[in-house]
Amino acid sequence: MRLFTFATAVGMLLSGCGDPATTTADADAATDTDAAGDGGADDGDADVPDVTDVPDVTDVTLARPDFGWDPAAPGPHGVGHRLISATWDAGELGGPRTVTVSVWYPTDDTSGVATAYRDGSIADPKVFRGAALAPPAAGDTYPLDLLSHDSGSYAGASRALIVHLASHGWVVAAPDHAGDLAGDPDGRATADYALRTGDLSATLDALATLPEGDPLRGHLDTSRVVASGHGFGGYAALALGGATYDLEQIGFACADHGGPGATPAGGCPDAAIARFALGARDERVAAVIAMAPTERELFSNAGVSDLDVPTLLLTGADDAVAPNETVGDLLWVAVPGPAVRVDLVGGCHQSFARGGCEALLDGDGDHVVTTYALAFARRELLGDDTVEALLTAAEPVSSKAVVSFKVPPAHPYAARLGDCLGESRPMLVERGLPFGEVAVGEARGWFLLDFASTLSSIDPTGFVGGTPAPLDGYENLFADFTWFGGWGQVWLTVFPHRTVGAIHEAGVLGTDFLALNVYALDYSAGRVFRADGAGCDELTLRAAGLKPLTTEGWYSSDWTTLPGGRANVPTVPIAVGEARTIAQLDSGFEDGVVPNAVNINDAMFEAIAAAGVTLERDFERDLLLTTCVGGVSEPAYGYRLPPGEAVVLVGEDGGAVARWEDAAIFLKRAPAAAAVCGGIGTWDTPGAQIGASLLNARGFVLIDPFRARIWWPAAAVAE
């Protein structure tokens, strides 16, 4: 049984309007300019660092007030540039490897020799080569941003961001990733994925061990840095921040076409696979800024959910290289909180580097990228809470920025319960609905975890990596089904599913699967847990702050033990005044338009009236709900609770486990044509149904079909 509102849920995606007066699109923020001379011709330093670039030693113990300058405006400093080198052992992927690293830093010099990039072919007249180092703004160390350029690009390509950070007192370090630079042959070998992350960690090593006499030695905080990257560099930043590789998918790519991004001669060397298995997490990375990152499939959503640092995701609505539909949106639903996403209206892939997008002026794009990147970096590395309004969209920056954010888990019940919860998988929560990742062969898709549906279903068009097909001679029998391990051949009803936000629903997992184990839905952390066997004991659950609600006679690991004709769906006891009944837990009932929805049938409506509670009619909330019969809708009539009344979840001790005075009541009347769908609208006895937002409200629910109990977070009855 699946019932959904017609309307679309209102998400957390917020947009603001900007003030053109605050843009940084002026001459000082111009994009890189090709130059034949004027500081470019004599800058032959792209291959070997020039020691004459080392800035003068200054008194770095002088302290300025703080880093609290307006993040939307250029900082008080000029920008200097120098080069160092970083060497590391790539082992069987190429032995000793040396990369040239550009370092940008704050300077108070107002003139000097213009620097240049790419063998001097791109001049930067507003950045001075070897300028004197300005003192830190606070204390005696500089905050550090570690930057990785896109594939086929160069270290200084994201000029606007580099200059903005350095002008605000930051040091930015970016290696030229040898073998994947502008002018190098097209095509990326599998080894390049491991070499790139190795270059970045080696850059931090080099900065941490600068030689005696270097003005940055001892004054650069390499223990806690921001890792940022554009495109392929965004992939590397995510990997350094804790995203883990999907070795199974990499294996498929190796077997199918020689490896992820592989050239014909690339292949999948064992040394690269070994590095993928180890992961690229660098504990010195404390936050990640991923700008239009590519290679999402290298991690899969499960790997992205393993990120263990705060993340800023910057995407472009018109990005053809990393489209939102297949990259940006899917990354966002998988990235755990705390996280911020800024989507550039009209932004293309080069909005985060060289610019030149058709639908977005460079100055407008630069203004958004630099403001949010600096604000995020200050919050995460410097503890600056003055930028919070920017990062939560309370204070708009530009009409070109669509901002959304995720907060860290508020109720860490999983951490309190520990191993007894069993294994966990990523759970995407879109519009309040929980989704788990299922594989059918090599294809993967997100299935709605719907505890109010007794039969599971599939939409093969909702998968990536392939389109599942039933076994020959069958319409509904699918092989190689994987959900917390392999299930072999399973029976799934085939029909088209909808798109929910960024997710094309590939199917529904109903209680024919879900009733076979104890499941916990951790909405706050974005994880679903499955215990093999009974899972956590009662004392452990109570000690974690959970309270039991009985579902005896309604939900069981063995549906044959239920009364005849009763659907195997978990329920909880509820009350409105003295009227009591049970309410189905419908995790698939999207009620984002009207949150805290509680559906009731005619029998419950009459019981509430008999208890002396008069529901107040609310015609504006009337809805049509879809049913299992195509083209047949079920009306739902809107009501409000009178003042002083509430919908109460009743615990085993008779006390209130939760209480909602703002519950939206809907009276459901099932049409005769949809009677085959079942549900409370067809019952002669009082019944109710709880929507997804009430499950989300406390962030966690554990459903135990073996003991017939629902464990709900304890809350004050005044919530």
Image (tube, helix red, strand yellow):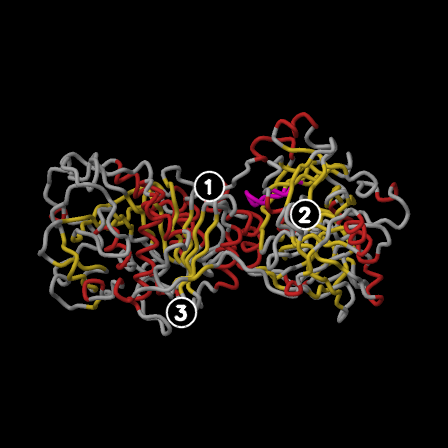
> Which residue shows up at 35% across the image and 49% down it?
376
Q: Nearer the viewer, residue 33 or 655?
A: 655
The residue that disc 3 covers is 346
- The x and y percentages for residue 634 are 75, 65
Q: Which element type, helix, strand or loop, lies under badge 3?
A: loop
- The x and y percentages for residue 83 are 20, 49
Q: CA distance from mark 3 to mark 1?
A: 30 Å
The residue that disc 1 covers is 308
Neighbour tally class for label 1: few under 14, some 14-19, many 20 plus, Cα within 10 Å = many
Magenta segment, which residues?
A: 520-528
Q: CA distance from mark 1 to mark 2?
A: 24 Å
- The x and y percentages for residue 400 are 38, 65
The residue that disc 2 covers is 483
Residue 525 in the magenta stretch? The answer is yes
Q: Nearer the viewer, mark 3 or mark 2?
A: 3
Sequence order check: which comes first, mark 1 or mark 2?
A: 1
